[in-house]
Image (spheres, grey):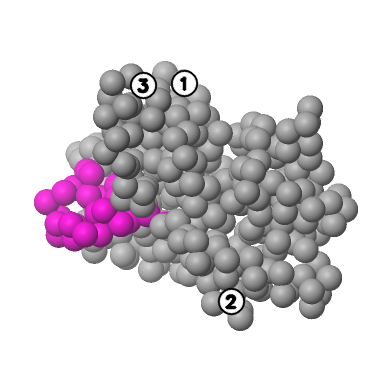
Amino acid sequence: MVTIDYAGPVARLIDNYTPTDIPPERWAIYAHVVRDILHACDFDGLSSVRNNTSLVAAYCDNAYTSGIWDPGSRHYPPLSPTHVEAFCRDVLADQSTRSQGRHRSWLRTIGRRHEPASWPPPNERYGHTSIVEPHPQREVQQLWAHATNLTATTGNPRYQAVIAVGLAAGPHPQDYRDLWADNIHIVNGVPVADFGAPNPRRIPLHHTWADRALDACHQLDGQLVVGGTNNTREGMMSRAAEQFNRRAAVRLNATRLRHTWMVTLLNEGCPVDVLADAAGIDSLRTIERLRPYLDPRPASHTVAWLQGRRP
């Protein structure tokens, strides 16, 4: 497996992290433990690090202040299922169900890594499917049909824009925060999407969705791709999806669109390194976990590739 180069920006982000809601004198007691835990994680990009540094810090702080962990006598705080569930129930109670689920999943992963004897063995089948799966073609058609009906009813093409851009360029959910309709345009004859922070990049649009992405974004007339002009809202993509999903046969999910785009390109023979750069990821972990969804390769193609020829 290809992992992140921890001599790079991920390591610096971890090593320089300092929480704003924990007193400095308390943070100094166990900061090294938080960083050790984070360095051992398999992150697929800087955004994943940012999303989880505060979570691990909060978990360690809670373990220390509640008296269940002494950093001087035990390297890591207890990470058993009981302790993880108690933290999620007591500390994360005010968060949305979606956020609680995401944080619980991440803490369980950390717990299995650092305290494996406390955890039951994972279901083997789950181990092969524990990823947001891409859409089959029929679901893509259903998504587009529902978005088209909403556009006809409301006159707002934002859902068509989200779906078309998602399938044409695979933005990460966080990419939508500063993804304006004007960022979907033509440069030197090539339709592209320009993404800003946290992973700035320019991605050529996949030809099957390029025209629809350009058309929907043109109709948005300078708004955000998710609609509106306020990019300070929390959970912008999630909030947009909630409205879409009220009467949708297939739920709108930015990550499923992204994974569908990735699988499409892999099936078409896109080199893995090219796809990783376009997706803005620093590890091949996600690509590896998408392998079960790839189309079977014809035997003749396999022979040609292994002989160093193009099929």
Q: Crowding at label 2, few (<14), some or many (≥20) Cα neighbours within 10 Å?
A: some
Chief secondary structure of the magenta portion? helix
Inter-mark Cα distance, 1 to 2:
42 Å
Indicate whether 140 appears above or below 41: below
Q: Secondary structure at mark 3?
A: loop
**Residue 116 on the magenta segment:** yes
Q: What stretch of residues is rendered in magenta? A: 108-132
Image x and y of residue 142, in percent:
57, 70
- The foreground one among 21 and 42 is 42
Give the amino acid type for the residue marked by disc 1 in the picture.
Answer: Gly
Indicate whether 45 appears above or below 248: above
* Residue 309, numbered circle: 3
Q: Secondary structure at mark 2?
A: loop
Mark with earlier residue (2, 3) = 2
Q: Is residue 72 visible?
A: yes
Image x and y of residue 185, in percent:
78, 40
Indicate whether 53 appears above or below 122: above
Residue for badge 1: 8
- The foreground one among 214 and 258 is 214
Q: Secondary structure at mark 1?
A: loop
